[in-house]
Amino acid sequence: MAAAPQRIVDAVLFDTFGTVVDWRSGVTDAVAAIASRCGVEVDAAEFALRWRARYQPSMEPIRNGTREFVNLDELHRENLIATAEEMGLPVDRIEPADLEWLNRAWHRLDGWPDSVPGLAELKRHFIIGPLSNGHVALLTNMAKHAGLLWDVIIGSDVIRAYKPDPNAYLGAARLLDLPPNRVMLCAAHNSDLAAARSVGFRTAFVARPQEYGPTQQTDLHATDAWDVIARDIRDLATQLRDHAT
Amino acid sequence: MAAAPQRIVDAVLFDTFGTVVDWRSGVTDAVAAIASRCGVEVDAAEFALRWRARYQPSMEPIRNGTREFVNLDELHRENLIATAEEMGLPVDRIEPADLEWLNRAWHRLDGWPDSVPGLAELKRHFIIGPLSNGHVALLTNMAKHAGLLWDVIIGSDVIRAYKPDPNAYLGAARLLDLPPNRVMLCAAHNSDLAAARSVGFRTAFVARPQEYGPTQQTDLHATDAWDVIARDIRDLATQLRDHAT
């Protein structure tokens, strides 16, 4: 009665920031809105890039065990304050509720144009979910905002590890009760895919050449022979459809 | 920029077994299928009721701390073997893969007729998810099978507590980063709602008078003044719609 699985994998999980949602536009808009409201001058696009530049380094102490796990709201808040100081944005002129609203811009990001239709197609055949450094509340709010119809949300606060820590990937497979080779990670970042592959995941690259804006230099192309290389999430759905029956 | 919330709550979470899905029919059918396949005689409906009767007692050692957390697949398997012995079903005549298929009948339950449309309506206004003693894999598989469009899946293996342990409810609210009074539990079991209310949740009762079959004696009616008392999940959606704008 147990039919042998025919599909290439059972679950397709996604990096979110950059891969599924366009953080740069969403965060830039939120910074501009707060600056305008407070009557301060700031290069909002540059602010967004610098805020994001602090993201990977801020997780490092947690990855190497010198800091207890805290979630991205916490790290984003610290990084926001540091970026504001760096760029001369007077944080004391922003109301606490507005600062919190700005910090939660990361909960309210929009998908790339192909994200919602591509995920809807994939959902017909696979378990789909984020495998993100975001926490459950952030990812749930983001999904409601952007209309991402995840089947399951795997937050970093559940696994208590930040990618590319191998436990982040293995913990996700364990939660789904799937062996790693029955799970695919889709990401716009080659390094994320390399970490996923090293623990046995299948891998899919989608290019997001505008993630960091028009002058982006990194991750413009797949740098390894990933299982699937797709133009976007719709194309990924099309390519996996052949394996999905 | 932070608008005051207008809705009665932000999230509506659901007990699943009995409240959202009809375990009795699904499990009875699976028992009958296996019995027929193995050429053994068994009262499948009675088997399902006795299997389920072992459910609450089997979680008790975990609730009171005398046993480490194990998930429902584990408990269901132990209870299945015990029920088979009790009813004279020769487990050794069932192939291991078939026994596993039978044990996972709890992953493949159908919703009550109002569950899918009621949840779809609630999803427009609220974060919806299971708050179940099921684990993430079971609840994800169940959602795919039954077409339950959860926003987030809160499994007992994430919280590592079984209801009515207060931590099961509080852990769910914490994961969503919501205060308990911004979360509503919907259940067909008065005792589950009492435990949820005691930690500050809002509560909604839906009657499932056929959960245990036509002779059911318990939970036929709300036994307390819950925030909402609804005929079913569609009716719950209608009643909450007034609060949802």
Image (cartoon, coloured by chain):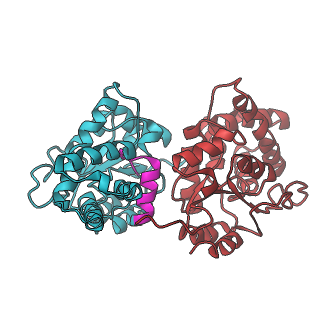
Chain colours: A cyan, B red
Q: Residue A223 in the image: state x and y as whole percent.
A: 14, 45
Part of the protein shown in magenta: A130-145
Quadrant placement of the C terminus of chain B = bottom right
B217 sits left or right of A122 in the view: right
Residues A143 and B240: in front is B240
Residue A132 lies in the magenta-colored region: yes
Q: Say how many tags the image has.
A: 0
Q: Is residue B140 above or below residue A75?
A: below
Quarter residue A213 falls in: bottom left
| Residue B165 shows in this picture | yes
Q: Can you name the residue that lies furthest to the front here?
A: A93
Query: Which residue lies at the image location 27% right of the left edge and 50% below the top edge?
Result: A187
* Residue B236 shown left or right of residue A26 in the figure: right
Q: Nearer the viewer, residue A157 or A175?
A: A157
Query: Which residue is found at the position 65% from the left and 56% from the top?
Result: B14
- Let me know if residue B72 is in the magenta part: no
* x, y percent for residue B216: 88, 56
Depth order, front residue of A174/B238 = B238
Q: Measured along the vertical axis of the image, is residue B94 above or below residue A93? A: above
The x, y position of residue A113, in whole percent, is 28, 69
Residue A171 shown left or right of residue A16 in the figure: right
Query: Can see residue B99?
Result: no
The rendered magenta stretch, by its main secondary structure, is classed as: helix
Give the image location of residue A239, x and y in percent. Answer: 28, 60
Q: Which quarter of the figure is the N terminus of chain B placed in?
A: bottom left
